[in-house]
Amino acid sequence: MKIAILNDTHCGVRGDMIEMSKYQGRFYEEIFFPYLDEHNIKQIIHMGDYFDRRKYVNFASMKANIEHFVEPMNQRDIKMDLILGNHDTYYKNTNDVNSPELLLYNQPNITVLADPVVKEYDDFSIALVPWINPENYADSIEFLLSAPASICMGHFEIEGALVHPGMTCQHGLDHSYLKRFDQVYSGHFHQKSEVKNIKYVGSQMQFTWSDYNDPKYFHIFDTEDQSMTPVLNPITMFEKAFYDDTKESFETISNADYSNLAGKFVKVVVVNKDNPYWFDTFLDKVHSQNPLHVSVVDDNKHMDFFNDDEIEDVEDTLTVLSNYIEGLEIQGKKKPLNELMTTLYNEALDEHNYL
């Protein structure tokens, strides 16, 4: 039996931007469902974060999701087991109030999993684990240590896992609780990475600049040989356009093809700009494709203020915060304070990466 694996699809992402709903719709209609049709796949496991916002769901985003994903799934009589992610839950300390159970309860082909469970797929057992929080922590750990399955799928926050390029998770579940499984697959973090026997499969779509130049895949799990096959989503939402008039002529700038920038977030990276008229022509060509957003950045911005030795000594933001907390004269509160600052920093970074 072959099972399509989705995760972190984030209905309503980027403040319910209509263009992002259309982008998600293109993935489902042009890439995902045609593949399932071709290979006669009738089962989906979604590893969490079906919705983007914890506190509410926009009606327009919900309608688009039903039209682009739920209705095509029902028309094909495809079943989906949906594991809760942290974005699907209203509270941070319990899964009791969650958007999938409240909004998808009347969908006969969707089963929402709010508690850990072992499910059989063509007589093959898979342990499915939703978001672990203070309320369900003890039960979840007991399940992980005893579940009769060799494969586990869930929405895990594992200490040491890659959060963003160059940043690892400084808190979360210790990987040793999952070592008894042959393989663990997880949603939650959007870049592909591995910690011991745990694989973060990465998101299927680009949502922020952190996803730029990061190939996105959905996956097919085969119960016969327990293989996980990636299937590329070639549709992107973030592009960089490099400008260097020392390597171009006015003719090449004027005649270049900029169609790949249409309807996308674009960063114009200025390497060298000696001719203002040429640069204005370049920007006009970029804007003529109607991108969603254009920002201009200098490739050498701020770098003239530092020499190489000084740059090597600069600490990243999280290290600065951590060192400051370690220097505080407080007892027993440094670890939770560190975790809080890391969470706030990651949330702020996500907001920054939107543009």
Image (tube, rainbow, N blue to C red):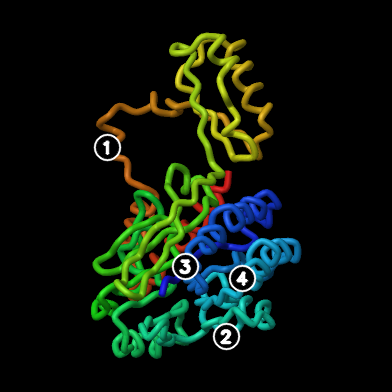
The residue that label 4 is drawn on is 76
Q: Which residue is mark 3?
A: 4
For marks 3 and 4 on the same chain, the one whose residue lies earlier in the sequence: 3
Counting residues from the start of the chain, the first of labels 3 and 1 encountered is: 3
For residue 96, the mark is: 2
Nearer-N-terminus badge (4/1) = 4
State if disc 4 and disc 2 touch (CB < 8 Å): no
Query: Of marks 2 and 4, which one's residue comes earlier in the chain?
Result: 4
- The amino acid marked with disc number 3 is Ala
Q: Tell me which label, 2 or 3, sits earlier in the chain.
A: 3
Residue toward you, 158 or 33? 33
Q: Does residue 339 sit above or below 243 in this rendering? A: below
Q: CA distance from mark 2 to mark 4?
A: 31 Å
Q: Nearer the viewer, mark 2 or mark 1?
A: 2
Judge whether residue 317 can be spotted in this image: yes
Say which of marks 4 and 1 sits in front: 4
Dot 1 amino acid type: Glu
- The three-letter amino acid code for the residue at tag 2 is Asp
Query: Which quadrant of the rendered structure holds the N terminus?
Result: bottom left
Q: Select label 3 or label 4 by which is in front.
A: 4
Q: Secondary structure at mark 2?
A: loop
- Name which residue lies at 68% across and 26% down: 288
Neighbours of disc 4 within 10 Å: few (<14), some (14-19), many (20+): some
Dot 3: element: strand
Could you tell me residue 92's position as x and y percent? 53, 76
Of the residues under marks 2 and 1, which one precedes in the sequence?
A: 2
What x and y, as percent, mark residue 8? Answer: 51, 64
Q: Residues within 10 Å of mark 1 (few under 14, many from 20)?
A: few
